Each structure stands twice: as structure tokens, then as C-alpha cells.
Image: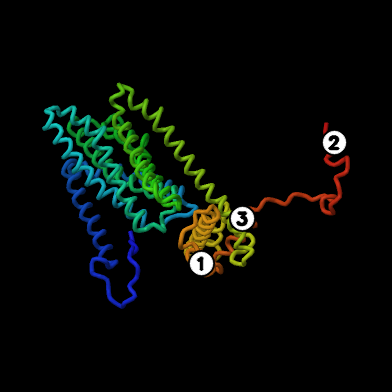
């Protein structure tokens, strides 16, 4: 993840101290993630063995592309840069997983030693310690993006995408551990095939509930996304804290489902987790539709000022038109570079519309004029490569014109027989 400097540029000609230089921060972050990855690799391989590690790795990677594609699809109206998602996945898979393994093991061992009750310590660790440690470790990635890449933090939907990808990376490493241990159990008892422990573990974690960890952490991302909006500054910190507490509570309920009896897992899964997942997905899609509506309503003012073409607000307010514009640019206007230019143009226009919407609602920031000018200049510089594709998409997706009768055209009142159909029975 490229971290932009939070310090203002120097005007006295002096150079910043070495630890404030950008390449130092980038190198330190990359080194931290690489070191965490090596340590977590050694720990997991030590617990599962080489063969179990390879089996777990092969099975754990199956749901990862689908989950990342789902979060990218959710954030496609104003997608954040891929470097943020790459950092989020690496943090979840390496740093957050290492923190969770070390802290959970230490806390569970300490409780078991202090209480002389290993079974009770395992239950307490799973239902109390693990949710707090794991959700806090995953939230650290969202916090870093929120602090150092605030401009890329695009509200609740963008926060949910970053948090979901972080949790996907965490679940990926955790699944390697669980699946590798399950494979070791099968090797020791001699089972294989669809009745094996490995197959059962993969079905539960990779088929039935691959969204569990992302669902928990998405609440943290939504909290940070709400805090990124220009609302009242005094209580803004309550949104991330509330989202993190909600993520911990849901995680604790999921881990403690075994305490509800023989069918506790099915009760929590069917009665709570699946409905919560559906409700959250519906709310995020509604939020995305709101961004499209804002683009349709706010961008026409820039048409009157000459910055945008007349057809662009309609095309930018429709997902279908956006997709057609990208496809048209890729096929006829220059291949993938042209399609990427259209995506950048669409993202910039959406951010401009949301900026103006916040200003009209009275939530204007001190840098509104500067930011508006930056976005308009960016649009103007890319208009030659993006405007033809958007105009084509607008023509294709525009609704057919409704017929106009002669009395409507010339302003006459409708005759008494208007709307009468002699063939209708």
C-alpha cells in the first residue's frame, strides 16, 4: 500500500528527517508484512506438517477469488485502488493472523494455568478472547487505510470492501491451519474421500460459511466509512468503535454457537448469520444505488458550465451504461488502457458528484474548492478518451422517446376521445 505523507511539504528547502521519507515508510511496511508472512508460514507448517500445509493451502485458496470479486463488484461505482486491497489482504493473511495465533495461544494458556480448567479456558478463549483479538487485529488494517489513504476511503461501501478483503486474507490463513490439521487427522485414522474430516471441514468453512469472517469485519469497515463522511467531528469516533464492538459481538456469537446444544451451529447459521448477511448486502447495495442517483442529480450543473457533455450524467448514473462504456472503449477505442481510462473517469465523476452533494447538504469541507477544481481538471484531461465511450453507452441505454400527440405538441387541451380504443373489449 502506498502511504501518502501526512506532513505538509517543506518550503524552506530543507529535507525531511530520514524516518519521514516515503520510501522508508514503504520499506518498513513491506518488511513488516514479509516478516509476519514468514513467521506465520513457519508456525502453520509446524502445526500441520508439510503435506497437510500443502493440502490446506490448495483448499483454502478456493473461496478467495470469489470473495475478492464480490467485494470489488460491491465497490465498482467508485472503486478504490488495487494497492489498498492488496495491502488489506496481506495484512489479514500475515500480520493479523500472526497476532491472533500468538495472542490467543498466550491468553488461553494463561487462563488454563490460572484456573486449572483447560476445557473452560478453551471455551472462554473461543467465545471471548478470540473475537476481541482477531477483530482488533483485522481492524488495524482498516485504521491504517483510514489514516494514511483517507482520500481513497470512499464511505461505507469503500470501508466495507477494505474490511472484507482484510477478513478474507485472515480467513485464508486460518483455513490453511484448520484444513491442514483435518488432513492430519484423516491420515492418523485412515479415512479419506467425502466422509473424511478434511471434506467436512472444507464444506463448513469453504462452502457454507466463507463469508463469516468478512461479515464480522465489514461492520468495522462500515463504521470507519461513516467516520470518513463530513459529519459532526465531535462524535465521529463513535462510528468505528461501534462497528468494532458489533463485529466482536457477532464473532463471539458465532464461536459460541456450540454452547446452544447439538444444533446450535445450524440455529445460529440459519436464524442469525444468513439473515444478517442478506440484510447487510441489501443495505450496501442500496448505498451503492444512492451514489448512482447522486451522480444523476448533481452532475448536470457541470453540463451547463461546459465541463461535461449532455449525455454523461445519465451514463454515469447507470451501472449498465458504465459497463457498456468500458466494453466499448476496450473493443474500439484502444484496448485495456482505454477501458482503464474510462473507469478512472467514472470514478472521478462520481467523487465529484458526491463532493457537491455534501456541499449542498451543508457538510462542506475547508478544501471544497481546491478538491472540486482538481476533479474537474482530471475529467477535462481525460475527456478525449472517455467521452465517446460514455456518449455511446448513453445512446444505447437511453429509454425510447414516448410519442407526442399533436395537441400536446401545440399546447391544446386533450379532446374527449383521447385514449379511446375502439378495438378494446
Residue 420 in the image: above or below residue 385:
above
Quarter of the image where one finds residue 278: top left
**Badge 3 is on which residue?**
314
For image coordinates 59% across by 66% down, the residue present is 307
Residue 225 percent location from the top left of the image: 41, 49
Identify the image quadrant of the N terminus. bottom left
Mark 1 crowd level (few <14, some 14–19, many ≥20, 10 Å Cα): few
Q: Can you tell which mark lies on residue 373?
A: 1
| Alpha-carbon span between mark 1 and mark 2 | 60 Å
Residue 348 percent location from the top left of the image: 50, 60
Looking at the image, residue 15 sits to the left or right of residue 418; the answer is left
* Viewer-closest of 313 and 187: 313
Counting residues from the start of the chain, the first of labels 1 and 2 encountered is 1
Residue 112 percent location from the top left of the image: 14, 31
For image coordinates 35% across by 46% down, the residue present is 64
Q: Nearer the viewer, mark 2 or mark 3?
A: 3
| Alpha-carbon span between mark 2 and mark 3 | 38 Å
**Badge 2 is on which residue?**
423
Q: Can you tell which mark lies on residue 411?
A: none
Residue 192 in the image: above or below residue 227:
above
Amino acid at each position: 500500500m502506498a502511504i501518502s505523507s501526512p506532513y505538509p511539504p517543506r518550503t524552506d528547502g530543507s529535507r525531511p528527517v530520514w524516518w519521514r521519507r516515503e520510501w522508508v515508510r514503504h520499506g518498513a511496511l513491506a518488511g513488516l508484512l514479509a516478516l509476519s508472512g514468514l513467521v506465520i508460514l513457519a508456525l502453520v507448517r509446524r502445526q500441520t506438517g508439510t503435506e497437510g500445509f500443502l493440502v490446506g493451502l490448495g483448499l483454502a485458496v478456493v473461496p478467495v477469488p470469489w470473495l475478492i470479486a464480490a467485494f470489488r463488484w460491491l465497490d465498482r461505482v467508485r472503486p478504490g485502488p488495487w494497492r489498498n486491497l492488496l495491502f488489506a489482504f496481506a495484512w489479514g493473511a500475515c500480520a493479523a493472523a500472526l497476532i491472533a495465533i500468538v495472542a490467543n495461544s498466550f491468553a488461553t494458556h494463561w487462563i488454563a494455568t490460572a484456573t486449572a480448567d483447560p476445557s473452560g479456558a478453551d471455551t472462554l478463549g473461543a467465545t471471548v478472547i478470540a473475537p476481541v483479538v482477531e477483530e482488533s487485529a483485522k481492524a488495524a488494517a482498516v485504521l491504517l487505510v483510514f489514516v494514511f489513504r483517507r482520500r481513497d476511503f470512499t464511505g461505507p461501501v469503500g470501508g466495507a470492501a477494505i474490511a472484507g478483503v482484510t477478513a478474507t486474507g485472515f480467513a485464508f490463513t486460518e483455513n490453511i491451519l484448520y484444513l491442514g490439521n483435518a488432513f492430519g487427522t484423516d491420515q492418523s485414522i485412515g479415512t479419506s474421500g467425502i466422509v473424511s474430516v478434511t471434506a467436512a471441514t472444507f464444506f463448513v468453512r469453504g462452502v457454507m460459511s466463507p463469508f463469516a469472517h468478512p461479515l464480522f469485519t465489514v461492520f468495522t469497515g462500515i463504521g470507519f466509512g461513516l467516520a470518513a463522511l463530513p459529519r459532526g467531528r465531535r462524535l465521529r469516533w463513535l462510528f468505528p468503535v461501534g462497528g468494532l464492538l458489533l463485529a466482536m459481538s457477532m464473532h463471539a456469537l458465532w464461536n459460541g454457537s456450540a454452547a446452544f446444544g447439538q444444533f446450535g451451529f445450524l440455529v445460529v447459521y440459519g436464524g442469525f448469520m444468513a439473515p444478517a448477511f442478506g440484510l447487510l448486502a441489501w443495505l450496501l447495495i442500496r448505498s451503492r444505488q444512492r451514489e448512482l442517483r447522486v451522480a444523476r442529480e448533481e452532475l448536470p450543473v457541470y453540463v451547463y458550465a461546459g465541463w461535461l457533455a449532455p449525455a454523461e450524467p445519465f451514463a454515469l448514473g447507470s451501472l449498465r451504461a458504465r459497463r457498456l462504456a468500458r466494453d466499448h472503449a476496450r473493443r474500439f477505442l484502444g484496448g485495456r488502457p482505454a477501458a482503464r481510462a474510462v473507469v478512472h473517469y467514472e470514478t472521478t465523476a462520481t467523487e465529484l458528484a458526491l463532493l457537491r452533494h455534501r456541499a449542498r447538504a451543508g457538510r462542506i469541507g475547508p478544501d471544497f474548492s481546491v478538491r472540486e477544481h482538481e476533479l474537474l481538471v482530471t475529467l477535462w484531461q481525460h475527456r478525449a478518451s472517455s467521452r465517446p465511450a460514455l456518449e455511446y453507452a448513453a445512446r444505447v441505454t437511453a429509454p425510447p422517446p414516448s410519442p407526442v400527440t399533436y395537441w400536446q405538441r401545440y399546447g391544446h387541451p386533450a379532446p374527449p376521445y383521447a385514449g379511446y380504443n375502439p378495438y378494446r373489449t
